[in-house]
Image: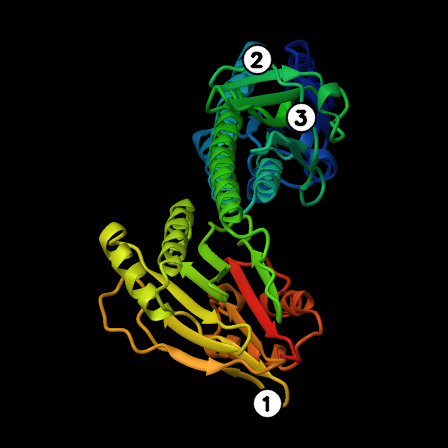
Amino acid sequence: MTPATVLVVDDSATKRYLLVSWLSRAGFTVVEAETGGAALDVLRTGGTDIDLVVLDVKLPDMSGFEVCERIKTDPVHGVLPVIHVSAHAVDVVDRTQGLNRGADAYLVEPIEPDELIATSQAVLRYYRARQRAETLAARMLKLAETTLAINSAPTLAALLQAAADGAYGIFGGPTVVVAETAEGEGLAATAMDGPATVRPWTVEHQETAVGSTVRTEQPDAWALVTWPEHEQVAIAASRLRNDRTPVYVAVPASSQSPGFPVLRQLSQAVAAAVEAQRSFDEEHRIAVTLQRSLLQSRLPDVPGLELAVRYEPAGAQTEVGGDFYELTTLDGRLLVAIGDVAGHSLHAATVMAEVRHAVRAYAVEGHPPGAVLQLVNHFMRTVLPTESATLCLFTLDPQTGHIRLASAGHLPPLLHVAGSGATFLSPRGPLLGINAPRPDDLEFTLPPGGTLVLYTDGLIERRDTDIDVGLKALAECAADVDPSLDAFCQRLLVNLAGAEEQADDIAVVALRRSAGQ
């Protein structure tokens, strides 16, 4: 029999002695009370340790029926089973009243010891089964909430934090959740009395097959939290692939029910979410590496011109985009291009590479900007018929400042001239991937000291504001151009992109014609 504590309530010392003796010999721990008020006081002060109440019907201060009713309507102790015993209220009416007012069993004297013990054990079996079912149902509900939280987490650290907070809420004790990043760095989230915290930590992996296992260990190896005294630790390890290390969830062993069903399912949910996050992080890292490898690491040296570029990939939880830029010299002229392929994925980054190389190839053939855009558009419609992109392209003669510019649906370039401030140019043209006529190229002269800025939408667009707000903010920020174009571009990023993790790639290209030209 599972150990249990019984509260015996009877004003007769002799009868109480018998009940206590029988229950004690059967292995129960017994607490005594002489009156109904004393019994309720025991429950108020230490009632969490009581598992069963054996209650006499006739008491000096109140009836046992009233005491039972108060117990059953109490929000804390209402689950306690109550057995009535009586030598006087023995007829059908009394027994019916006792059961109707909440008693779980009704014994009339003379009571045989075996009958009392058997009834107590039967009532406890029922209530414990009910408590296990209710606990499991509550834990499954919290498990569903935790699974939603971990799958909604934007980063691996946030995922582990949500898992540790959820495990603490499910099992009501210290928890540790451990996983490795895509780079093999260990992270541990721990929860005790407040919100979970995440820190680097290295775990010594045991041989674990694909699937999930639960084992019990001493707490020494999991000393990230303070475990209850004399407590062992239940460790659930889940592994989805042979080439991945397991995910671990550690909780107090005493909080577990047979078979560890909830702990096992929680570890499996965490492992699945971690695997998805790892895969996304790997793809994001590959795409960013691809983008950076395709973008120029060194700008051309053009006498009479100062050049600066900035490229910032999207935040870690956002798929990469297809932003790119190109600056190169062709036959004494500077070719400048900036573009953005639609979509956010590794695929968008690969399409960006194809479009960038096409721009360079057609420009090398000597075509003017508008013709280059027409050829690139034909290339995309033939080879990449489902893709679209924006592109702004121009050539600049460093000696005269003459610019010939064409745009395919890209954001308007910003021109800054000392004394005139910052204004947006207005080239027109359909985006790449659409079969539509193109207007003539825009031709103008960049005056000495003038600055031209090209950018992608990540610099100015926000989901919660109109694009005109972003354009206005860019014009205000560029009203004064720093002596250093590098510092100027950095200021645009800091002031316009904001402190929050950006949701889109940002590319900025700035060039300034020397004042002495």
Above or below 197: residue 484: below
Looking at the picture, which amino acid does disc 2 mark?
Answer: Glu
Above or below 379: residue 97: above
Q: How far separated are the C-alphas under marks 3 and 2?
A: 52 Å
Q: Residue at x 46, y 23 (%)?
A: 241
Disc 3 on helix, strand or loop?
strand
The residue identified by callout 2 is: 207
Looking at the picture, which amino acid does disc 1 mark?
Answer: Ser
Looking at the picture, which amino acid does disc 3 mark?
Answer: Val
Label pair 3/2, CB-CB below 8 angstroms = no
**Labels 2 and 1: the sequence-earlier one:** 2
The residue identified by callout 3 is: 8
Whether residue 425 is visible: no
Q: Tell me residue 499's x, y (percent).
A: 64, 62
Give me the disc on residue 420.
Answer: 1
Q: Residue at x 49, y 48 (%)?
A: 294
Residue at the far bottom in the pictured view:
419
Whether residue 516 is visible: yes
Q: How far separated are the C-alphas under marks 2 and 1?
A: 71 Å
**Labels 3 and 2: the sequence-earlier one:** 3
Above or below 160: residue 426: below
Disc 2 on helix, strand or loop?
loop
Disc 1 on helix, strand or loop?
loop
Q: Tell me residue 291's x, y (percent).
A: 49, 48
Q: Residue at x 55, y 40 (%)?
A: 72
Single out the mark in the foreground, 2 or 1: 1
